[in-house]
Image: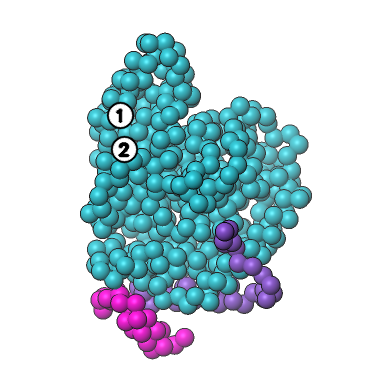
Amino acid sequence: MTEANALTAAEIAHEVNAGSLTAVDVIETTLARIADRDPVLNSFTAVTAERALARAAAIDAAREAGQSLGPLAGVPFAVKNLIDIAGLPTVAGSRINRDHPPATADATLVTRLERAGAILVGALNMGEYAYDFTGENAHDGAAHNPHDPTRMTGGSSSGSGGAVAGLLVPIALGSDTNGSIRVPASFCGIFGLKPTYGRLSRAGSFPFVASLDHLGPLARSVADLALAYDAMQGTDPFDPVCADRPIEPVAEGLDAGVAGLRIATATGYFRAGAGPEALAALDHVAAALGAGTEVELPEAARARAAAYVISTAEGATLHLARLRTHAADFDPDVRDRLIAGALVPAVFVQQAQKFRRWYRDAVLRLFDDVDVILAPATPCTAPLLGQKTLVLDGVEMPLRPNIGIYTQPISFIGLPVVAVPVVLGGALPIGVQVITAPWREDVALRVAHYLEQHGIADVARPPA
Amino acid sequence: MTGPELDAWIDAGTALLGIPVEPAWRAAIRLHLTITFGHAATVLAFDLSDEADPAPVFLA
C-alpha cells in the first residue's frame, strides 16, 4: 500500500499541483484504503467511487491543459451522511430517511470544497439524527475507533472521526450541535474545528437543533483544517443563520505564533468531574502556552442544562411527525430521548433561551481580559463500545447524555473552538478545547498550529 | 414529580401528541424525562429580569 493515504491535504494538493502525483492516483489509493480498512472501522455508509474517479480525471486533465488548480487539488474528503450528496438520500444516520428521494444537489459546503479542487469520496456513518455522543448506530452499526476498534469513536460525527484518524481521508465534514465534532476529534485523536455559529453555511444538511447546529471540518493537521475552512467560508442565502460577513482567510496567518495572546484555563465546572487523563492533557497544553491565569465561565453548569433542554425539545419538534408514524423505526436510544423531549413544557425551553442570552453576555465579558480559553473536550478517553455509564465526580451517570458536558456550554453560545489532540504516556488520545471570542477562528487555529508545531498537540498514527 | 405523576405525564403527553409508546420503551422515556426536568429546574432557578430577551431574535 502506498503511503499517499497518509499524506495531509496540503501535501496532496502540493504534489497534485506540481504534477508529482495525479489526482487519479490519490483517489485510487484512497478507495483501496477504504476497501482495506473500513470493514473494521465502519466509517463509510456510501462510497462515491465513480464520481470521485471522474472528478480526479478532470483535475488531471485540467493540469495537463495548463489550467490552475485549487488549493485543495486532488484532496479526497467525505461528509457525515446528514450532508447532501446529489443522487443519494440524506439518511442522517436513520433508517427512516432511506425512503427519502435522493438529494438533487450537493450541500453548499460540498460544492465549495470541490470548487477548491477537493474530491468527494463518500458519506460517513453517524449517530442517528445527530442525537448522540457515542458513535453507536442501531442501523449501520457502530463506528470503531482506529486506535482501538473495541472503543467508541465518539459522536455524532462518528465516521468523520474514524475516517480521518484511520487514514482513509485527510479531511471530513461533521456537524456539531452540542459537541459532535469535538467529541469524536477527542476520542479519535485528531483536530476538529467548530466555527462560530453562523460562520459556515448549513444549507443542504439535515438539521437537528436549528438554534445550535454548526458544520465544520475534522483533519489530521491544523493547516488542513484551515485550508478547508477558508474554502468553505462565505455567506449563503439558503441558510438563514449564515452570517453576512466577508471571507476572512486564516491559512496564511497560522504561523503568527502565540506571543501577545492572553491565554487562560477554564476552572470550576471544567475541572470538576474531569478524569485524570483529561486534566493531564489540559495542564500539558496550558503549560506549553504559558497559560498562567484561570477563568471561570459563569453559570457553566446551568448553560449546559439549558443547552440540554433546548436540544431535546427542538429535536423532538423536528421529529414529531416521524415519532407519530415511525416510532419503532428509530434507533431505540434516540427514540426514547426524543419522546421525552416532546413532553417538555414550552416554558422550560423559553426560559433556557432567555438564559442563553444572559450567559452569552456574561461570557463575552471574559474576552475583555483574555483572548483564548482552554478547557477539556471530553471528561475521559474513548469508552468501550457498549458502555452505558461513566463516573463523573464520583457519581455513576448515563454515558450517552454526559460525554458532552464540557462541549455543551461552549457551543450553546456559538463560540469558535478548535479541539486539539493530546497523547500522553502511550495512553489513548484525548482532546483539549481552544476557545476564542466569536469570529476569531484565526486565533484558535493559530494556537492549535503552535501546539502542533511544538509537538504538544499530536496526531497518533493508528495501528496498521 | 413522583413516579406515578411522571407516568401520568407521559401518558397524557403522548396521547395529546399522538405518539405511540410500547411498554418496553417506558423506563427509558421516564429516565430521560427525569434528567431533562432536572436540567429544566436548574434553568428555572436562575433569576432573570422580565426584560431579558431570549436568544433567537427574528429579523423582519
Dot 2 crowding, Cα within 10 Å, few <14, some 14–19, many 20+: many
Chain identifier of the residue bearing label 1 in the image: A
The kind of residue on which mark 1 rests is Ala
Residue A381 appearing in the image: no
Chain for colour cyan: A
Q: Three-letter amino acid code at disc 2?
A: Gly
- Where, quadrant-wise, is the N terminus of chain A in this rendering? top left
Q: Which residue is mark 1?
A: A52
Residue A234 covered by magenta stretch: no
Q: Residue at x 51, y 30 (%)?
A: A227
Q: Residue at x 65, y 39 (%)?
A: A443
Q: CA distance from mark 1 to mark 2?
A: 9 Å
Dominant secondary structure of the magenta stretch?
A: helix
The answer to whether the residue labelled 1 contacts the one labelled 2, judged by CB atoms less than 8 Å apart, is yes
Residue A260 in the image: state x and y as whole percent.
76, 36
Residue at (77, 49) in percent of width and height: A369
Identify the hue of chain B: purple
Q: Mark 2 sits on what residue?
A: A122
Outermost front residue: B60
- Would residue A217 be visible to someone looking at this image? yes
Q: Position of residue A423 (x, y in %)?
A: 51, 40
Q: Which residues are magenta?
A: B1-27
Q: Which mark is residue A324?
A: none
Most foreground residue, A349 or A243 = A243
